[in-house]
Image (spheres, helix red, strand yellow):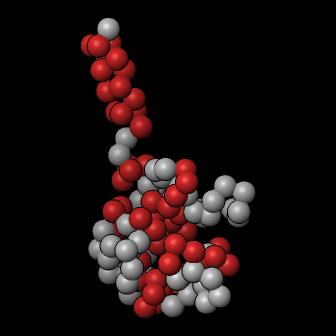
Amino acid sequence: MKGLIAAIAGCLCCSLGTAAELLPPPANKEGVTYQKDIRPIFEKNCFKCHGPEKQKAKLRLDSHESASKNKFVTPGKSAESKLVLAVARVGKEEEHMPPKGKGEPLSKEQVALIRAWIDQGAK
């Protein structure tokens, strides 16, 4: 019985994949910047809870400085960045952004652009 349970658990892990495998790939766009490409996404989708008036989870996304230098972004490593996992809705449901019922999820293209920005150094 233990062997059967282990085999089923192994199959489930393989079929679910790692977080990085579940993410859309980074966008091919070169020279992605916060001001030109990322701020408009954050402004439309995130500022209400992570902007100048409110910073849930102590995360502020309305300036380049605060968006790029926090515990949620790992410059050069988008697949490891908590921000990417949250907006891609990969991992724990309670960490998905925006939370269920609080707004539309970001599109795969928007997540891909955020990944490119982070992989390119979060400039």
Examine the rendering and report whether any part of residue 48 can be seen.
yes
Camera-side residue: 36 or 66? 66
Please say if 23 is above or below 55. above
Q: Where is residue 112 drawn, in percent x and y?
A: 47, 66
Q: Where is residue 35 drawn, in percent x and y?
A: 51, 90
Count of numbered tags:
0
Camera-side residue: 95 or 63? 95
Q: Where is residue 110 drawn, in percent x and y?
A: 55, 68
Quadrant where the N terminus is found in the figure:
top left
Please say if 104 is above or below 66. above
- In this picture, residue 36 sits left or right of residue 82: right
Q: Residue furthest top?
A: 1
Question: In the figure, residue 80 lies in which quadrant?
Answer: bottom left
For the point 44% across and 55% down, the residue is 23
Camera-side residue: 94 or 63? 94
- In this picture, residue 106 sits left or right of residue 16: right
For the point 31% across and 27% down, the residue is 10
For the point 37% across and 84% down, the residue is 69
- In this picture, residue 90 sits left or right of residue 50: left
Examine the rendering and report whether any part of residue 37 can be seen.
no
For the point 62% across and 63% down, the residue is 98
Q: Where is residue 52 drawn, in percent x and y?
A: 61, 90
Quadrant where the C terminus is found in the figure:
bottom left
